[in-house]
Amino acid sequence: MNSFFKKGVQKNNVFVFLLIVISFVTLFPLTSSAMQAKKGVEYYYETGEDYLMHSCTLSFGKLDGEAHELVYTNSGRKLSELIWELEDVYLAGLSFSTNPDERFHFNVGFWSALNDGDGYMDDYDWLDNSRPNQWSDWSHSPVDLIKGYMFDMNVDVKFWSNDYAAISGILGFKYDHWKWDAIGGDYIYSVGGGFRNWTGSFPDSVGISYKQSFYVPYGGIGGSLNFSRFHFNTYFKYTPFAWADDVDHHVMRDLVFYDTFTGIDYFSYGAEGSFFITNKWFLSVAADFQEYKETVGDTEIEDLKTGGRGFISKGAGISHEDFYLSATVGFRF
């Protein structure tokens, strides 16, 4: 089990799972949530008529997670793994939703990091062939999140509903981008035929810069419940067709690794509760989890000193997971 889950995300996932179970038990309550472009919250007046509308939301929240970067030899043996944390990252988001008729909602949203977080990067190498299952070199560095943003757009199509509940299908596309700088830190290396026999510290400057970009066409299903001024919804999204690219710049070694990945399994689920303050203004709280499963791809290596390049088929690996808790204020018109 990786360090991200050891730091409590398992508990967060249980929380999200319980919210989703509650919603499904109560008639499979519609898509939306903080990390997904939101379908506008529906509110049924005393006349029982559905209010067709546009809506805008502003959200703030806290995200925790981690990304994995892996390096493989030509034979497929894992040579290196770098774990980049997303810890105490605060995001702000804007979303817009419109429904041209009762069944269709078109939604778009954008979220951006507000701070550089409090995470670390751990870099493990397996370079000792006599101890293939034990890391030979390790370093630990604080990281700054340089960039972090997510974009999502989708269409929500309602295929069943009554006065209080609805079920819909979702088709959409999302883009996630993250970039870190690892600065300074400490290391334990194996040198001169020894094993973990050399320790020290890096200069207090950027040693490694790493960025990930994910491209995700997805489908999903969602449900909602409406009780007077209270609204509850949940969703599940999945695709086996996500793709990604990443760039790793080892500054002190003057090496850059360019990796590409296809056929990534992606899934996401979340739940949200909303309350109408007035007929137009509402408040929401939401919990969302997403994961990009570990996938192997190709890597190209550039030596910045000599200009030389090399290519390794299936020489790289990537994964990512995060959990987001947020609060939202919304207005419909």
Image (cartoon, helix red, strand yellow):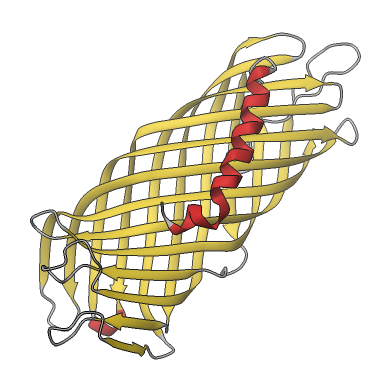
- The foreground one among 173 and 226 is 226
Residue 103 in sight in this render? no
Residue shown at 59%/55% (left/top)?
A: 63
Please tell me how many numbered marks the rendered image carries: 0
| Residue 305 screen position, x and y as percent | 17, 84
Residue 105's place in the image compared with 35, above or below, is: above
Of residue 117 and residue 57, the one placed in the foreground of this image is 117
Left or right of 329 in this view: 83: left
Q: Can you tell which quarter of the image residue 240 is in?
A: top left
Q: Residue at x 13, y 60 (%)?
A: 73
Q: Is residue 210 left or right of residue 147?
A: left
Q: Is residue 54 visible?
A: yes
Judged left or right of residue 274, residue 72 is left
Q: Position of residue 51 (x, y in %)?
A: 79, 20
Residue at (36% x, 57% y) in the render: 68
Image location (x, y in percent) of residue 211: 38, 63
| 182 relative to 330, above or below | below
- Rendered location of residue 62, percent (x, y): 64, 56
Name the side, left or right, on which 100 lies relative to 42. Answer: left
Screen quadrant of the C terminus? top right
What's the residue at 65%, 48% (across, down)? 325
**Looking at the image, residue 238 lies above or below residue 74:** above
Q: Nearer the viewer, residue 290 or 109?
A: 290
